[in-house]
Every structure is written in structure tokens, then in C-alpha cells.
Image: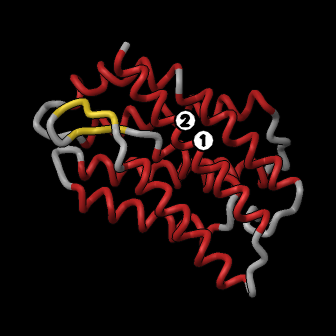
Amino acid sequence: MDIYLDFAFSALLLLALVSVYEFTTTSIKFRNTFVEVSVCGVAIGLMTVVILSNPVHVSDGVFFDARWVLLSCCALFLNWRIVIIGGIVAASYRFFQGGAGAVAGVMTIITAVSVGYFWRYMLVRFNQDFKWYLHYIFAFTLELIIIGVIYTFIPEGKGLMVVKVITQPLLTLFPVVSTVLTLLFQHHWNKGIEAFS
């Protein structure tokens, strides 16, 4: 039960940070696109750093949070340059944190961005409306892939143990949070806000 509460806190922290980001990007007028992309990219990176600084500890040097939920949703809806900047900041910080899960942590960031871009490409390629149930399928699929990445890259034979601990909360809680987040982002996308393009 405690791990559910820890993951719930990480999810709530994510939603709070995204609310601040959305308010800021819709309220501030930037001088030009370069400034907007740079500021928004660093902001996404710093949001991920805050999330990474409040993790759920599973084992020595192995901890989890909602970083991949944020970055995958950003890859779906934000300007690609913003996501790349944010991803570099996030991956650098996670590697700097070190621990047994450092490589796996960086790989979850790369995977989240890649999955988000893949879905974005497929939706555009086939001119598919991103209906609410597709939001959930996207989120659930992402969690399955992330679990596979964690199992593969956690060293010292800890992969199976870690997966057993995190699978249930990841598959029940994070898809719901991700669905809410993508619906919020889609709302801003539809309004034509510059950063969401």
C-alpha cells in the first residue's frame, strides 16, 4: 500500500507541475520562437528534475517516478525541439544521480520520448483522431514497454525483483494519470497554442 501512495504522490506532483507549465505558456508572450523553445525546453527539463528528486525508492540505487509519463506526453504534443532539450536535461540529471538504475533510468527517458514520437507519427500518418480510448491505450502500452526496459537494463539480477514490485502500481495508476495529462495537452493543442505544435 505504501508504494501506491508513493507513486500517487509522484503522479500528483507531475500534474501540479504541468498545470504551472500550461499556465505559464498560455500567459507569457515570448519575443520569438527561439526564446520560447529554449525556455520551454529548459522548463520541461527542470520539471523532470523535480520529479526525479522525489522518487519512489525500490532498491539501493533503484528508484522510480513519473518522468516517462511527462516526457512521452510532451513528445506527443509539444514542439520536438522543446522535447529534445527537456529530454537531454532529464537524462543528464538521471545519469548524474547514479546508482544501479542509472542506465535503466536514462533508457526510460529515451524510450518515453521515442514511444511518444512514434504515436504522434502514426496518428498523423493515418490521419487518426486521438480519441479518449486511444489516450488510455497509448498510456498502457507505454507502461508495458517501460517495464520491459526496466527488466532489461537493471543490473545484478535485480530486474525481476524490481518489476514484481512496480508492475501493479504502474499498470493501474500511471495509465490514468497519463490519460488525464494527454487530454489536457490535446486541449491546448486544439487551441493552437504555439508551444503545442
5 on left or right of 152: right
Decide which of 144, 57 is in the foreground and name it: 57
**Where does label 2 land, which residue?**
12
Q: Is residue 126 visible?
A: yes
Image quadrant holding the C terminus, namely: bottom right
Q: How many marks?
A: 2
Determine whether 148 is above or below 114 in the image: above
Taking the spot 16% from the left edge, 45% from the top edge, the residue there is 100
Taking the spot 83% from the left edge, 44% from the top edge, the residue there is 128
Q: CA distance from mark 2 to mark 1?
A: 5 Å
Q: Which mark is residue 2?
A: none
Taking the spot 73% from the left edge, 67% from the top edge, the residue there is 195
Instruction: Give residue 180's quadrant in the image.
Output: top right
Residue 42: x %, y % from top left: 52, 70
Residue 76: x %, y % from top left: 67, 52
Residue 37: x %, y % from top left: 64, 76
Q: Is residue 118 visible?
A: no
Q: Residues within 10 Å of mark 2 (few under 14, many from 20)?
A: some
Residue 106: x %, y % from top left: 34, 54
Q: Residues within 10 Å of mark 1 (few under 14, many from 20)?
A: some
98 on left or right of 43: left
* Amino acid residing under circle 2: Leu
* Amino acid residing under circle 1: Leu
Q: Secondary structure at mark 1?
A: helix
176 on left or right of 27: left
Determine whether 132 is above or below 33 in the image: above
Residue farthest toward the top in the current orientation of the protein: 1
Q: Secondary structure at mark 2?
A: helix
Q: Which mark is residue 15?
A: 1
Taking the spot 73% from the left edge, 33% from the top edge, the residue there is 134
Image quadrant holding the N terminus, namely: top left
- Whether the residues at callouts 2 and 1 have beta carbons within 8 Å, the answer is yes
